Image (tube, grey):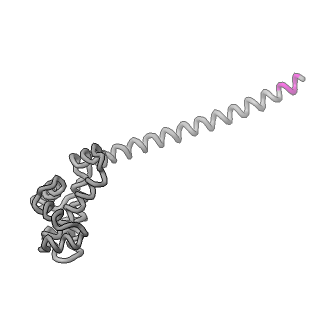
């Protein structure tokens, strides 16, 4: 998703969904959020809360009322108001992501483990190369062993 594709002031349902999706993904991929999710015993509740907060914020930026948002998301008006007023941790995190989008543009950064994937790919390639070399050596040794067995059988027959 590029910056041009994600409007910070959505005008259509498609725009709302683009902003909502970008907010959810960018917030979920933050290192601090990933850590909270890893440590939480209520992972699904936590992730659901982030999704609702992102949906509420995207719809509010499109000019929808709390009542409309609640109906659209299938949540209570009180829940939507808590998110929109920033009284939930999920809402605070999503709002931080939105502010970052507003100041830096819509950029979804991969967490450290994903950014290190080039190094991981290089190591996998090295290991694949070494594995092929070892497989070739094993094949050569198996051929030598087969020849040695055949020779040993011939010698046994000759001695018998």
Quadrant occupied by the C terminus: top right
Q: Percent from the top left, x then y, of residue 84? A: 12, 63
The number of discs equals 0
Nearer the observer, 89 or 23 = 89
Q: Residue at x 78, y 29 (%)?
A: 151
Q: Which quarter of the picture shows residue 145?
A: top right
Q: Would you say the magenta stretch is mainly helix, strand or loop? A: helix
Q: Is residue 112 above or below residue 154?
A: below
Q: Which quarter of the picture shows residue 76?
A: bottom left
Q: Percent from the top left, x then y, of residue 108? A: 22, 57
Outermost bottom residue = 12
Q: Residue 90: within the magenta?
A: no
Q: Residue 157: within the magenta?
A: yes
Q: Which quarter of the picture shows residue 56?
A: bottom left
Outermost top residue = 159
Q: Is residue 85 above or below residue 143?
A: below
Nearer the observer, 127 or 47 = 47
Outermost right residue = 160
Q: Is residue 101 above or below residue 125?
A: below
Q: Residue at x 48, y 38 (%)?
A: 130
Q: Residue at x 62, y 38 (%)?
A: 139
Q: State which region is magenta.
A: 155-159
Quadrant occupied by the N terminus: bottom left
Q: Percent from the top left, x then y, of residue 66? A: 14, 70
Q: Residue at x 29, y 49 (%)?
A: 42
Q: Percent from the top left, x then y, of residue 97? A: 16, 57
Nearer the observer, 76 or 160 = 76
């Amino acid at each position: 998703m590029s910056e041009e594709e994600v409007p910070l002031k959505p005008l259509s349902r498609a725009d709302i969904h683009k902003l909502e999706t970008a907010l959810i993904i960018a917030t979920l991929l933050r290192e601090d959020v990933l850590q909270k999710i890893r440590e939480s015993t209520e992972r699904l509740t936590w992730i659901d809360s982030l999704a609702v907060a992102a949906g509420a914020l995207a719809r509010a930026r499109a000019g929808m009322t709390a009542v409309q948002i609640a109906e659209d998301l299938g949540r209570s008006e009180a829940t939507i108001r808590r998110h929109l007023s920033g009284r939930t941790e999920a809402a605070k995190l999503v709002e931080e992501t939105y502010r970052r989008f507003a100041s830096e543009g819509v950029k979804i950064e991969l967490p450290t483990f994903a950014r290190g994937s080039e190094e991981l790919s290089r190591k996998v390639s090295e290991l694949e190369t070494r594995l092929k070399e070892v497989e070739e050596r094993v094949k050569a040794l198996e051929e030598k062993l087969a020849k040695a067995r055949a020779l040993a059988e011939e010698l046994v027959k000759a001695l018998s």
